[in-house]
Image: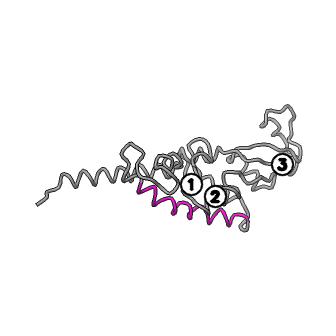
Amino acid sequence: MENDYWSIDAIFAENQKLDCTFLLEVPNLGYIDGGDMPNIPAQTKMRLPYWLAAPLLVHDYLEFRIPPAVGYSVLKALSAEPRSVKLSSLVGGGGSWYKFGKEISELLEEATSKDLTEALPKTFRARLVDLIDQAQHFDGTAGSTSASGTGNEFREGLESTEREIFALAQNSAHLMKTWHESSDKR
């Protein structure tokens, strides 16, 4: 996320916790889990935020378990029906699921990350049509019905990037309607 220093979505994505296991003793970091030991012993399990775990992973101090938000069961549900999954509830703090998934895929080995790297754009494309439709026909009520149920349920499941696109598409539809109503109809 080197280009996202000021992005609140990037901050939320980097604060997601990873279940990690230290592979070797780490000197002078015993304080990070609130412990009173000066070092972290090997095989210690700890939940660390992405921003802290990533550099430790690169230097082979620890390994991590793939988070449930981008795990097998979520990817399976997304491959079955992407619009039925509430991406906003998978990651806390604003629901930056795509950014978090991208970051996790970069930490994984190529063979392991293949399913996730394919699922991210595929999910986005599959949900985009409903997202634009909902934005253009949204009037504050339940709106039109998506494949996953009511339009309101679909909108509640939008993650942060999708919510931004929804707002842009909604504004675009409003501007188009205003222009159309004010144009000369000769």
Sooner in the amino-acid sequence: mark 1 or mark 3: 3
Nearest the eye: 73 or 171:
73
Is label 1 in contact with label 2 (beta carbons under 8 Å)? yes
Residue labelled with disc 3:
22
- Classify residue 125 as left or right of residue 55: left
Give the SS element for disc 2.
Answer: helix
Q: Residue at x 70, y 44 (%)?
A: 17
Point 46% across, 57% down: residue = 130
Q: Secondary structure at mark 1?
A: helix
Going from N to C along the chain, the mark reached first, 1 or 2, is: 2
Residue that mark 1 sits on: 84
The three-letter code of the residue at mark 3 reads Phe
Counting other residues with Cα less than 10 Å from the Cα at mark 2, is it few (<14), some (14-19), or many (20 or more)? few
- Image position, residue 100 (x, y; %): 62, 52
The residue range painted magenta reads 112-133
Residue 113 covered by magenta stretch: yes
Left or right placement of residue 123 versus residue 150 in this view: right
* SS assignment at label 3: strand
Front in this rendered view, residue 69 or 47: 69
